[in-house]
Amino acid sequence: MISRASLAVRVPGDKSISHRALICAALASGRSRIRNILRSADVRSTGGVLSALGANVPQLGDDVRVDGRGLGGLAAPDEPLDCGNSGTTARLMSGVLSGCSFPSRLIGDASLSRRPMGRVARPLTTMGAHFAFDSGEHLPMVVTGGRLREIEFDSPTASAQVKSAILLAGLVGCVRVTVREPVRSRDHTERMLAALGIDVRSLGLEASLEPASELAPFQLDVPADPSSAAFFAALAAAGGVRGGGPLELTDVALNPTRLGFFRVLRDMGADVTWEVHREECGEPVGTITVAPRGLQGVEIGGDQVPAMIDELPMLACLGALGDGVIEIRGASELRVKESDRIAAVVQNLRDVGADADELPDGLRVRGGTRSLGGAVQTHGDHRLAMAFGVLGALSGNAITVDDPDCVSVSYPGFWSDLERVTS
Ligand code: S3P
């Protein structure tokens, strides 16, 4: 057991839950109140898109109140819907818009405009929506919704965005849907909709939703994001917190589908515990405590990947420390994230002096390099900036990140929180 940590961090609200909270609030019948929503660029993209559809989402503050339009209440937008850098906005809203009988044009930044949208367009087209792409299966695209049909969909990818798009299409289009995945992905949509009175069943690899006439308004205090907490867990595990001691990460969403990184950190030898203190809209919430110990290597395979998909850049960076080898396989999804995270992480690790190899579906990093130094290119990817920021904060390392401001996508205060726990 770890002695009580003297340093604590409450990272900002969970990004996945924040997106879903705004969408559900806009679709609810009545006024919802969301506290501690993540105030980041990605969540603002969802708020902006919903406002353009008539939902009038206010500026994101500590206490956001949204007057829902009801399941059939969104209106045709006058302008293209700008999803910014946010894949979650584009894909979840594709589902919502599939149940709306008007055309909407979705656009995004350069990174989002390279990311695959066919994965949502295919099942939603089967349900009866229409998708038109300017080129390939990328944004910009026009989604035209309408009368939808039921679907039983076997998803080739373990993707919560695809699963959620179909569940939301079923909700707005009032039809029964079933989605089966190869590996279970995060289940925030299922938990939130069930907490709001919708008949959503989630059993093993299958999630299904029964049609409903309305969605109840709600109050939600968004728990902290385990993907943001993971950066500080890695720092603490590597002995990088001030005084080299333990760190407490408070009020974190402890949904088991998001805890893969913390389980692996424990397998690598770090002292990691968590305890649930409350439940929020079907989500367990509590404290994670991490204390350093020598980190060993680890092998990660396909089944473990979805529960730690966003944490893999950080895990790869930890591979450069210690003496073991970290090998990640079955993670080709990393190539279609905000950047090609396999190529970018390996190139950056090499550029700072680490021993790393790219694999078609993952990467391999060997430890043993005593000090790491050099310049890192983020390609505008927030998680690369933060992973290498943690590596650079460890004593003996000197790493500069080309675009530190890109953390605003998910964690605007990251650099000051890092400074606070390290100096
Ligand atoms: C998310 C699902 C994951 C994750 C992303 C957020 C969500 O994406 O990487 O950051 O909120 O549903 P995929 O569904 O593409 O795996």
Image (cartoon, rainbow, N blue to C red):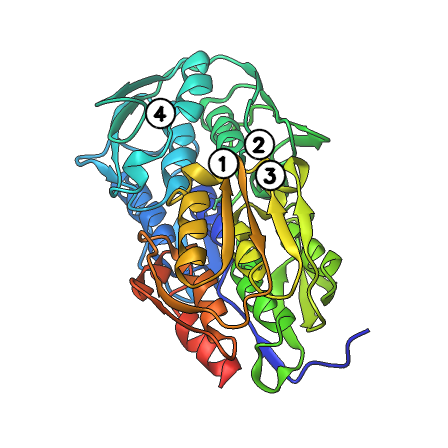
Q: Amino acid at mark 3?
A: Arg
Question: Is the residue marked by circle 4 packed among few (<14), some (14-19), or many (20+) residues within 10 Å?
Answer: many
The tally of labels here is 4
- What residue did someone put label 3 on? 329
> In 3D space, how far apart are the residues under numbered discs 1 and 4 (Cα atoms)?
30 Å
Instruction: Answer yes or no: disc 4 within 8 Å of ligand 1.
Output: no
Q: Which mark is residue 100?
A: 4
Q: Which percent across, then down, holds residue 54?
A: 28, 40
SS at badge 2? loop
Left or right of 405? Residue 302 is: right
Q: Amino acid at mark 4?
A: Cys
Instruction: Answer yes or no: disc 2 within 8 Å of ligand 1.
Output: yes
The residue closer to the viewer here, 150 or 288, is: 288
The mark closer to the camera, 3 or 2, is: 3
> In 3D space, how far apart are the residues under numbered discs 3 and 1 (Cα atoms)?
11 Å
The mark closer to the camera, 3 or 1, is: 3
> In 3D space, how far apart are the residues under numbered discs 4 and 2 (Cα atoms)?
26 Å
Q: Which mark is residue 251?
A: none
Q: Amino acid at mark 1?
A: Glu
